[in-house]
Amino acid sequence: MPVQYTSIIAEHSAVRNNIGIFDVSHMGEILIEGDESGKFIQGVITNDLQKVNNYQALYSPMCFDDGGIVDDLLVYKFSQKKYIIVVNASNIEKDFDWFLKLKKQQHYSNKSLSIKNMSDYYVQIAVQGPDSAQRLKKFVDLDIENIKFYHFSEGKIFDFPAIISRTGYTGEDGFEFYLNNTNGRKVWQSLIDQKIPPCGLGARDTLRLESGLPLYGNDLSATIKPTETIVKWTVKLYKDNFIGKNALTPAAERKMYGFEMINKGIPRHNYEVFKAGKKIGFVTSGSYAPFLKKYIGLTLVNNLNLSPLDFIQIKIRDELKTAQIVKVPFYSKKYKK
Amino acid sequence: MDAIDNIYYTNEHEWLKVEGDAGTVGITDFAQSELGDIVYAELPELSSEFKRDEKFAVIESVKAASEIYLPVSGEIIEINKELEDSPEIINHSPYDAGWIVKIRIKDKSELKKLLSKEEYMRLTSE
């Protein structure tokens, strides 16, 4: 996926107003099967797998023993014995090795737990925007409108078999399609032929930030605990046990806030954040928000309680510029439920 | 992407249109295209002075921030106020409505150090 096909702002607007497609085939897919697959996954993610039914997806971070984040991922539950975990492209090998290591450490047999890296097999195409269901209807063989948010089905698009989920990373209604490599290429081209605009990494980032979704590498990392972030709701400490539970149990020392620039300027990753002359933290993600027409960002702040409307300063190229704490998400659209 | 006659260029993709002792400065079509959607322009104060190749402005696109250097030593006599609310003008019209500053040129001999249109086109065709 290039940074942009035409312009980041045009692509961002296409998704917010109508429809856009993303070639997300770089993401990874790991197939976990077996009688103990559910138990295994429940023990490695922070969120509660028992809350999802068959054909439902669950978003969760996955942590190290010290509470730092290995990756954030989506668990697709096909049945009690079959799951596909979708992981970030940059973490495929790391996540796969992590799973294999844990399987060995926890003494699961091959019979009860099988873990396969299917990333080369699958291609993912995301179709996002309020017009998604309407535009896709005639190309999909099932009633796409009735797939509930964060649920998925197995069906066909342009006659090719696909896993179709009502998920996305843009804050708009939309679908993610998982197909095999060869078919995926054909479906991408067919969508392009339908004059649906392709959108790149640039718009993918501005869309997700504007809708308050974190990015691994920026807002989530091995040195950030999920309890310190905007996805702290995914940590279910009531669960019996999971990797990182002990480290995540005490109250978080740092907090993540959304902010909006008051003085113009673009906040970017790692810029220092100040309050009353003292450095309080740093920017984890920041950008221009094309729909809101504002400059926004997320900051990880040390041990300080801030509220919306509080002022902070962001150091942008040697100059302290004023920003104001705002609620996250910065933008929200009613998801189809 | 076109370069226009009678304008000097720099290695850093600025252009300078000389009019007597004054000049207008902007960035080239190649530069705006590389930058992508421009969302903010940090402009200098009126009457501030800069040496040749000194950073006088910063242009931020969604992707990155880019320093802009003054092609010749000069004093800022006018800044393009339109850029405050509509910095994207630079993307749409880099040689015309997207001009950045007007300067009083201090030393015309410095013009010799700039690139001709041909030299600049060669630079950007590599």
Image (cartoon, rainbow, N blue to C red):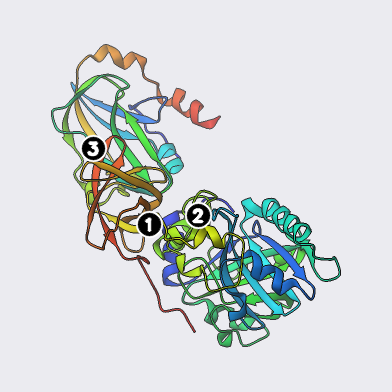
Q: Secondary structure at mark 1?
A: strand
Q: Which mark is residue A220?
A: 2
Q: Is residue A78 visible?
A: yes
Viewer-proximal residue among A94 and B14: A94
Q: Residues within 10 Å of mark 1 (few under 14, many from 20)?
A: many
Return the mark for residue A255: 1
Image coords of residue A109 (percent x, y)? 84, 66
- Residue beneath disc 3: B43
Q: CA distance from mark 3 to mark 1?
A: 34 Å
**Are circles 2 and 1 on residues that touch, CB within 8 Å?**
no
**Closer to us: mark 2 or mark 3?**
2
Q: Amino acid at mark 3?
A: Leu
Q: Position of residue B114 (x, y in %)?
A: 36, 19
Q: Secondary structure at mark 3?
A: loop
Q: Residues within 10 Å of mark 2 (few under 14, many from 20)?
A: many
Residue A106: quarter of image: bottom right
Residue A247 placed where, x, y %?
A: 52, 57
- Residue B25 has which mark? none
Residue drawn at point x = 31 percent, y = 57 percent: A259
